Amino acid sequence: QKEVEQDPGPLSVPEGAIVSLNCTYSNSAFQYFMWYRQYSRKGPELLMYTYSSGNKEDGRFTAQVDKSSKYISLFIRDSQPSDSATYLCAMSRVQNKLVFGAGTILRVKS
Amino acid sequence: SQTIHQWPATLVQPVGSPLSLECTVEGTSNPNLYWYRQAAGRGLQLLFYSVGIGQISSEVPQNLSASRPQDRQFILSSKKLLLSDSGFYLCAWRARGTYNEQFFGPGTRLTVL
């Protein structure tokens, strides 16, 4: 079993939809959770990071962590075609190496 | 602000040839530096990380090596490339004192023929 599981998609949604991207993990020691966005043939860009459980909001993006279920989510409101990318979750123990999910391909259709 | 550079952007090399990929970071001092490889449809695999000049930790045994000759310079090398070395190579940095937010460079796409 992989430490971090992420559905590869692709996930196709119409413009304006609310998108939900998710990861599950097995290591209960993970404390730090991140979401990266990666456009085709580019390096990943850090979108959101949260420490321990709870929610964090930044504009159209909301990150949620449920440590009891070992489940994290990224919500994108009012999705735009420019949101089309691969979304990678990543997590770690504090100041330890990051473990990445395989990424979910998102396509937002105009 | 901080920026991270990688070059070359694209590289096509024959099997058995040497490799040198370079990464430099601007606007920060004494960062942690990382080399990752990304294969199609798979997550990022950590190859090497460095906490300071000359200090390299290897995560995966392979025919690659890394060096950090200067504070903000990180080099990935190989003496003889294999077909399996093809992939997208990413350099990343983390500032000291942060939890673990890593920032990635633009990447180098390597094709070994």
Image: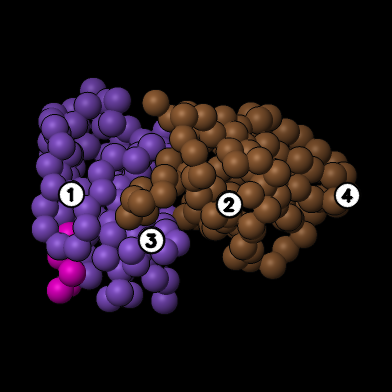
Chain colours: A purple, B brown
Q: Which residue is mark 1?
A: A63
Q: Earlier in the sequence, mark 3 or mark 1?
A: 1
| Residue at mark 3 to residue at mark 1: CA–CA distance | 20 Å
Mark number, residue B52:
2
Can marks 1 and 4 be said to lie on one chain?
Answer: no
Q: Amino acid at mark 3?
A: Gln
**Residue A80 horizontal/vertical position (percent):** 22, 27
Chain letter for the residue marked with disc 3 in the picture: A
Q: Could you tell me if residue B38 is visible in this image?
A: no
Say what amino acid the circle numbered 4 marks: Gly
Asked if labels 1 and 3 touch by Cβ distance under 8 angstroms, the answer is no
The subunit letter for the residue under badge 1 reads A
Element assignment for label 3: loop
Secondary element type, mark 2: strand
Residue type indicated by callout 1: Ala
Q: CA distance from mark 2 to mark 1?
A: 32 Å
Are the residues tagged 4 and 3 within 8 Å (C-beta)?
A: no
Locate residue A4, reporting x and y percent. 36, 66
Foreground label between 4 and 3: 3
Q: CA distance from mark 1 to mark 4?
A: 45 Å
Q: Which residues are magenta?
A: A65-69
Picture quarter containing residue A93? Answer: bottom left
Foreground of the two, B63 or B41 = B63
> Where residue B56 sits in the image (x, y, percent)?
64, 58
